[in-house]
Structures are given as structure tokens and as C-alpha cells.
Image (cartoon, rainbow, N blue to C red):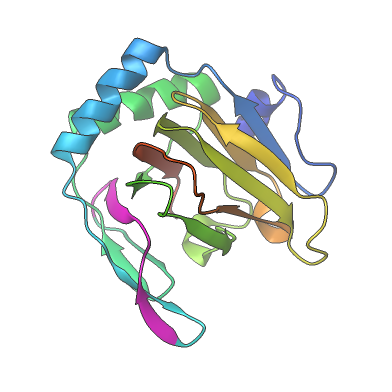
Amino acid sequence: MQQDLFLLKYRNLLPYQGEVGFYDGFLAQEVADLFFKLLEDQVPWKQEPIWMFGKKVMQPRLTALFGDPGVTYSYSGIEMKALDWIEPLAEIRQRLKAHTSVDFTHVLLNYYRDGKDSMGWHRDNESSLGKNPCIASVSLGATRNFQIRHYESKSNKIDIPLNHGSLLIMAGESQHFWEHQIPKTKKELGPRINLTFRKLI
């Protein structure tokens, strides 16, 4: 697999059943600063309702989807139609392709306004992502703690600070056997933009 060539460069953070690679300096600080400002200003952010435990609630963050035309993306009861690529996202996509050799087709953006915004435990295992998807997560803005744990045993929890300009790759069987979240925090934090690039089939 193409992403395996990327993951060979980095220590696998998972003990078994999947691969997670982390690169803290994917974007230089001044480049990450520029992308953060451009995306904060240019993306039409929305707060969407989702189904959780049989109830419809508003997501504790803002979102947007960009990608190739003709394919929608669905999760948690939401069906999102991709907006056309804008220049900052297209450039990051090209940087990721050069870095990983993966042709990502879409990017889901999450805007965390402060420490109260979050993402609960979940797996990116929708059928539209294929059997063993490669997810490339680029972080911009405030550092947030990314947590991953084994889905069945809820053990082997790993904490990874996702810094400004960092890149996290989840690949192989990771979405079958591991779940991840961005928990709330009481710390005074500025905003964060997370870009999760994926290849829809």
C-alpha cells in the first residue's frame, strides 16, 4: 500500500492491529500560520446536528467538507455534499501527496473554537472510506490532546499532543480496532482547525 511507504519512516504508535504515524513538523510555523488565517476566513463554517444515543444534538464544533465533485460523505446521520477545493486546501493536499503518495479525494474540516469544543470517541469506518482507510490529519492552531484506545478492551490508551503544523496518519486496520477522540479541556485555549484528508470510494 502507498501509505505504508510513509509509515515506514516513523515509529508505529500502536502496539498491534493497525498503524499510526506522527510527524510534528509537517508544516513550518510561518506556513501553518498562513494556512490557519486563510482557512479561518475563507471556509463557510457550519454547526451541524448529529444523532447521539438516539437524540439529535448540535456538534460541539464547526465543520465543512471539501472534495472532488459527485461524491457525498455521510456520518452520524449527516450527509455532507463537498464544496469545491479552495487554494489553501488544494495546496495542503498536494503537499500530502508528495509526502505520502496518497491521492486524497476529500477533506473534512473541524473548527474547535476553544477548549469546550470537542470530538467524542469514534472510528472512521464508514463504508465509503474502504476496508482499511488512510486518514491524514493536519492540525493548525492551538495544541489539542488526541487520544486513541483499543475499541473492544478500552485499554492501551495513548495521548498525542497535536501541535500547530503537525501531521497524524492512521492507516491499516486502525479504524477496525482503535477509536479516537479530542476531549474537552478546562484550559484556556485559542481556536484550532483540524483537516482530516481521506479517500472516498
Camera-side residue: 83 or 76? 76
Residue 41, above or below 172: above
In this image, 104 relative to 48: left or right? right
Residue 120, above or below 11: below
Camera-side residue: 74 or 148? 148
Q: Residue at coordinates 40% horizontally, 40% vertically from top-left?
A: 194
- x, y percent for residue 137: 49, 38
Q: Residue furthest bottom?
A: 54
**Picture quadrant where residue 50 is located:** bottom left
In this image, 18 relative to 163: left or right? right
Residue 145, above or below 183: above
Residue 132, above or below 140: below
SS majority, magenta: strand
**Picture quadrant where residue 20 is located:** top right
- x, y percent for residue 40: 22, 36
Q: Residue at coordinates 51% horizontally, 27% vertically from top-left?
A: 163
- x, y percent for residue 166: 50, 26
Q: Quadrant of the N terminus?
A: top right
Does residue 62 show up magenta in the picture?
A: yes
Q: Residue at coordinates 29% horizontally, 54% vertically from top-left?
A: 62
Does residue 35 show up magenta in the picture?
A: no
Number of dots carrying numbers: 0
Which span of residues is magenta-colored? 55-69
Q: Quadrant of the C terminus?
A: bottom left
**Picture quadrant where residue 32 is located:** top left
Camera-side residue: 184 or 49? 184
Q: Residue at coordinates 35% horizontally, 26% vertically from top-left?
A: 92
